[in-house]
């Protein structure tokens, strides 16, 4: 560095035109108030990043929205449709991957680092040298062991099978891991408890977990809830007096927010908030100033004093003879009475003056500065302030969203790398088929145009329907095709039922009209009505009348019931009462047989059945309401 260049932290730049020997001291622009508390080591950086996240709700909410913006549908490849559906159900329902990805994103944006491992449940058993074994929980409830020197030593009760007591070999601990991938859980480790050994040349990392003190204390005391679920490797590490536990290679998934190449971080990522520490500091200074204003300047002080300006030329001081203390006491009593009874009349022997002091907090509050600094902070973090406030205009939305999506490749890579790591773990550990899983790309800015183009390409058979439907969130085209066919079948059935009902209603209306005309003619002395002319099939054949209706033992209609409208209505009522008491299958059979023999009578009977069912429903509703009123 040349001699005339200032130091980054302590140098003093030269004034324009000044010689090297005649320097003019200016305050260093980088030595501001925030520099006094700027963290200098990784541990303090993580603590400050956590503190800012926890104490600033607006910044935290903006980061959480950003983390969840990129969580989309899971896409499985290299497997068939059935396996893809099963794997998606396992990831979404059993592993809760959507919630886990949200927590991973929050942790990444808070600390700039994420440490993930998979916890595989296991069943812990205690086994005796004689072959007898029992589960850890059962042995604990039965009092078969006590924890001594990090071993499960037999108690005086001994082994239930060989009766070996505490002076014999301790219980052997046998663990059996779960065989199904859906039983595992995704766990995040605190960055405060991690240590990394990093090779800057090869990039290889070795991860160490700082064993929490309460966990070590629980193992030493033999707390069953800790001993039951803690791996023997960790128990042995604690028994050996180790403060850290080294993980095997590939057991820990770690991603850090990358720092510039010239910054040596020891394999760690740097929290993004540290790059904007001065903005966060400035924003908090304005908030603190606003808090001070709110404490002293929001509520004005109300003061009542004697009005000396109302006295004449010879008027004396209104406080002469009473004193200031007596005046204050009288005013306080007046205020107290007014609070108890606002309608009370008050009197004063002297004129009073009412004044307000303070209350100018709204003018002093730096709200505009606070909002401007918040927007600057969010923009510097990579979160468009307009998007967070919901004020992004439609004209600028496509470009702004595209810039926003391209500003966070780290989060997209984080999610996809974690999913790929989980897929590899499932394949290698649980003998699942090899598969690849990732999130559907986020392209909200281009969705409308892209969907339109994909539909056009699908219509031209240039892309498959599955590819086009994926843009609409349709993951299983086979399921959608099946639902489409079911919908078409249901529509056809409903349409047929509607047409039948309309046709029957028209037939019934026509019958009523013809019966009315025939009745009028009969009353005027005309010829008797001919059942054959009315579409009733003519008179029944000799000897047998109408054939019986099948299915429910339905009686044969009376021949006289087909001669007059009144008798036919009565016969329809009788048949309807018989048919409605039948079972569903017998009812259908009876109606079918009736329709074959006499369509007019069938229409009347069906109408009566529907009226009776409607009346029954209405009566049921009325009874329920009456019971509710009684209760």
Image: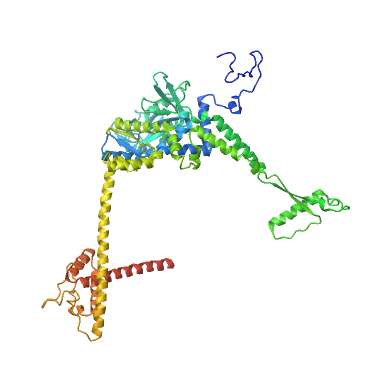
Q: 73 or 398: nearer the eye?
A: 398
On-image quarter of the N terminus: top right
Furthest-left residue in this view: 543
How is the model colour-coded?
rainbow
**Quarter holding the C terminus?**
bottom left
Residue 369 or residue 175, whichever sits in front: 369
Residue 352 lies left or right of residue 497; in this view the side is right
The answer to whether 424 appears left or right of 291 in the picture is left
Q: Residue furthest bottom?
A: 525
Q: Say whether residue 82 is left or right of residue 53.
A: left
Horizontal and vertical percent for residue 88? 32, 39
Q: Position of residue 364 (x, y in %)?
A: 65, 40
- Between 477 and 329, the one nearer to me in the picture: 477
Residue 433 visible? The answer is yes
Vertical relation: 196 (above or below) 459:
above
Count of number-bearing discs: 0
Q: Residue furthest right?
A: 314
Quadrant housing residue 71: top left
> Is residue 89 at least partly visible in the picture?
no
Report x, y in % for residue 98. Answer: 39, 39
With respect to residue 592, does 334 lie above or below?
A: above
Please tell me whether residue 452 is drawn above or below residue 211 in the rendered image.
Answer: below
Q: Percent x, y for residue 384?
A: 49, 37
- Residue 461, placed above or below residue 606: above
């Amino acid at each position: 560095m040349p001699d005339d260049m200032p130091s980054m932290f302590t140098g003093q730049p030269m004034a324009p035109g000044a010689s090297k020997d005649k320097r003019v001291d200016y305050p260093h622009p980088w030595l501001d108030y925030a520099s006094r508390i700027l963290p200098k080591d990784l541990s303090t950086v993580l603590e400050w990043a956590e503190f800012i996240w926890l104490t600033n709700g607006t910044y935290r909410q903006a980061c959480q929205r950003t983390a969840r913006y990129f969580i989309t549908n899971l896409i499985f490849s290299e497997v068939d449709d059935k396996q893809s559906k099963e794997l998606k159900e396992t990831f979404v329902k059993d592993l809760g991957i959507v919630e886990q990805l949200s927590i991973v994103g929050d942790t990444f944006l808070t600390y700039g680092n994420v440490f993930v491992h998979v916890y595989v449940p296991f069943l812990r058993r205690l086994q005796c040298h004689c072959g007898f074994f029992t589960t850890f929980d059962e042995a604990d409830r039965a009092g078969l062991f006590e924890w001594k020197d990090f071993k499960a030593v037999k108690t005086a009760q001994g082994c239930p099978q060989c009766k070996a007591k505490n002076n014999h070999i301790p219980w052997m601990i046998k663990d059996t891991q779960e065989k199904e991938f859906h039983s595992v859980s995704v766990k995040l480790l605190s960055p405060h408890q991690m240590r990394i050994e990093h090779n800057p040349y090869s990039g290889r990392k070795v991860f160490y977990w700082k064993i929490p003190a309460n966990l070590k204390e629980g193992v030493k005391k033999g707390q069953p809830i800790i001993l039951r679920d803690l791996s023997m490797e960790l128990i042995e590490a604690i028994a050996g007096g180790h403060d850290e536990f080294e993980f095997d290679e590939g057991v820990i998934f770690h991603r850090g927010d990358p720092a510039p190449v010239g910054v040596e971080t020891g394999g760690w990522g740097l929290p993004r908030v540290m790059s904007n520490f001065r903005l966060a500091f400035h924003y908090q200074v304005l908030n603190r100033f606003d808090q001070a204003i709110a404490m002293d300047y929001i509520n004005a002080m109300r003061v009542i004093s004697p009005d000396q300006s109302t006295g004449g030329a010879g008027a004396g001081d209104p406080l002469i003879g009473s004193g200031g203390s007596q005046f204050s006491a009288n005013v306080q009593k007046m205020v107290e009475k007014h609070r108890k009874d606002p309608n009370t009349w008050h009197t004063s022997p002297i004129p009073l003056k009412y004044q307000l002091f303070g209350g100018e907090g709204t003018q002093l509050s730096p709200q505009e500065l606070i909002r401007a600094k918040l927007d600057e902070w969010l923009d510097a973090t990579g979160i468009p302030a307009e998007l967070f406030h919901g004020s992004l205009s439609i004209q600028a939305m496509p470009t702004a969203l595209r810039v926003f999506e391209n500003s966070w490749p780290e989060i997209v890579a984080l999610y996809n790398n974690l999913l790929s790591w989980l897929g590899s773990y499932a394949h290698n550990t649980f003998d699942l088929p090899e598969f690849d899983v990732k999130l559907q790309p986020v392209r909200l800015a281009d969705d409308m145009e892209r969907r339109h183009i994909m539909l056009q390409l699908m219509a031209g058979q240039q892309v498959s329907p599955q590819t086009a439907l994926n843009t609409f969130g349709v993951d299983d085209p086979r399921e959608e095709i099946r639902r489409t066919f079911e919908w078409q079948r249901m529509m056809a059935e409903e349409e047929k039922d509607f047409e039948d009902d309309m046709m029957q209603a028209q037939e019934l209306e026509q019958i009523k009209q013809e019966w009315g005309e025939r009745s009028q003619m009969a009353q005027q002395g005309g010829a008797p009505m001919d059942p054959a002319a009315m579409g009733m099939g003519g008179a029944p054949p000799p000897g047998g009348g109408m054939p019986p209706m099948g299915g429910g033992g339905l009686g044969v209609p009376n021949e006289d019931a087909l001669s007059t409208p009144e008798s036919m209505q009565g016969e329809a009522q009788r048949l309807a009462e018989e048919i409605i008491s039948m079972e569903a299958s017998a009812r259908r059979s009876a109606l079918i047989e009736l329709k074959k023999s006499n369509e007019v009578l069938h229409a009347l009977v069906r109408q009566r059945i529907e009226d009776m069912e409607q009346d029954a429903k209405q009566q049921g509703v009325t009874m329920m309401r009456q019971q509710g009123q009684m209760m």
